[in-house]
Amino acid sequence: MAEVQCVKCGKAGEPLTDPIFMGKLEAEIKAKVCKACWKQWEGMRVMVINEYQINLGDESGRELVKKHMRSFLNLGEAVDSSKVAENYKPVQ
Ligand SMILES: [Zn+2]
């Protein structure tokens, strides 16, 4: 199976093959992020939504989650996630 050179962990890893429902970001994420790191983001995402009390019914809420995602996966500029980082325990 082809591997993906992941921008998050810096390693060649197992690619994401399942749909992740990210619209136009999906191809970019799948080309740059390995499966393990995406799984980490899925855990992180829940914490981001809880900590920042993001309303996913709002366009602005969904944009904020995307910003955090890009930051977490090293796909975009960093955003302040110190609120989450306090509680975040990376899975090794
Ligand atoms: Zn990775």
Image (cartoon, rainbow, N blue to C red):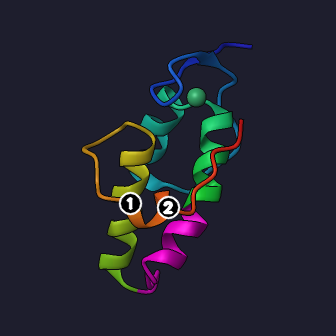
| SS state under label 2 | loop
Q: Is residue 16 visible?
A: no
77 relative to 90 in the view: left or right: left
Task: Establish if 71 lies above or below 3.
Answer: below
2 relative to 67 in the view: left or right: right
Q: Nearest the camera: 17 or 66?
A: 66
Residue 21 appears at what percent x and percent y?
56, 57
Q: Which mark is residue 86?
A: 2
- Residue range corresponding to the magenta coloring: 45-57
Q: Quadrant of ligand 1?
A: top right
For disc 1, the neighbor class at 10 Å (few under 14, some 14 to 19, many from 20) is few
Amino acid at the residue labelled 1: Ser
Could you say which quadrant of the image residue 42 lies in? Answer: bottom right
Residue drawn at (65%, 57%), measured in percent from left and top? 43
Residue 76 appears at what percent x and percent y?
29, 42
For the residues labelled 1 and 2, say whether their Cβ atoms are less than 8 Å apart.
yes
Residue drawn at (64%, 15%), measured in percent from left and top? 3
Q: Residue farthest to the front?
A: 86
61 relative to 26 in the view: left or right: left
Marks 1/2: CA–CA distance: 6 Å
Residue 4 appears at what percent x and percent y?
57, 19
Amino acid at the residue labelled 2: Glu
Residue drawn at (42%, 36%), measured in percent from left and top? 28
Residue 39 appears at what percent x and percent y?
67, 46
Q: Which mark is residue 82?
A: 1
Mark 2 vs ligand 1: CB below 8 Å:
no
Could you say which quadrant of the image residue 80 lies in? Answer: bottom left
